[in-house]
Image (spheres, rainbow, N blue to C red):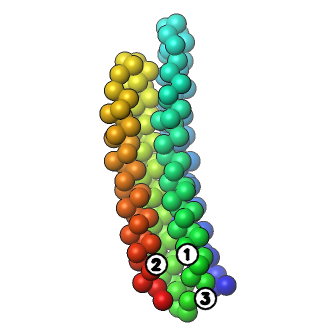
Amino acid sequence: MDPMIVAGAIACLGLSAAGSAFGTGFAASAAVGAWKKCYAANKPAPFILLGLVGAPITQTLYGMILMFIMLGKTGVANAGLASVLLGVFAGLGIGLSALFQGRAAAAACDAQAETGQGLTNYFGALGIVETVAIFTMVFTIIALGSIK
């Protein structure tokens, strides 16, 4: 097994997962603060905020999918450098999508808890940020298909 291909695959997963960790962390912190405000005001705390908190976790799955596809290239000669480059840049694109999705989800948590309105709009905005990660995954799969 070419260690460069493995390194690219792990870089892709690791960077994607790091973005998910940052994104869910930002959103979770905001949700906890929003719930605290609700409890202090004797308002029901909206459970739906967990959906906003969990939105950035899907980017880890995209990194995992790419990791498995990259690991499938282990029998291909001279695929190591391409795999490392694809893994790092795809992982960064996917991870940054998760990070900024989490920042948007944090704002959505605050807004939803305060107003009780706009949830569909908030998820729509998060979906647009998610699209960056999906495009990155798809285009990376296309690029990996050219490695023969």
The residue identified by callout 2 is: 144
| Residue at 38% from the left image edge and 69% from the top image edge | 139
The N terminus lies in which quarter of the figure?
bottom right
Mark 3 and mark 1 residues within 8 Å of each other at the beta carbon: no
Can residue 33 be spotted in the picture? no
Of 23 and 129, which appears nearest the observer? 129
Q: Tell me if residue 82 comes above or below residue 42 in the rendering.
A: below
Identify the residue under disc 1: 70
Q: Is the Cβ of the residue at disc 2 closer than 8 Å to that at disc 1?
A: yes
Q: Label 2, secondary structure: give it.
A: helix
Q: Residue at x 42, y 57 (%)?
A: 133
Q: Where is residue 17 drawn, in percent x and y?
A: 56, 55
Task: Identify the amino acid type marked 1.
Answer: Met
Q: Is residue 98 left or right of residue 121?
A: right
Q: Read off the residue under disc 3.
A: 75
Q: Distance between the Cα atoms at labels 2 and 1?
A: 7 Å
Q: Are marks 2 and 3 in contact (CB under 8 Å)?
A: no
Image coordinates of residue 130 in percent, x first then y, are 40, 50
Tell me which residue sits at (50%, 71%) in the image.
87
The three-letter code of the residue at mark 2 reads Leu
Q: Position of residue 8 (x, y in %)?
A: 55, 74
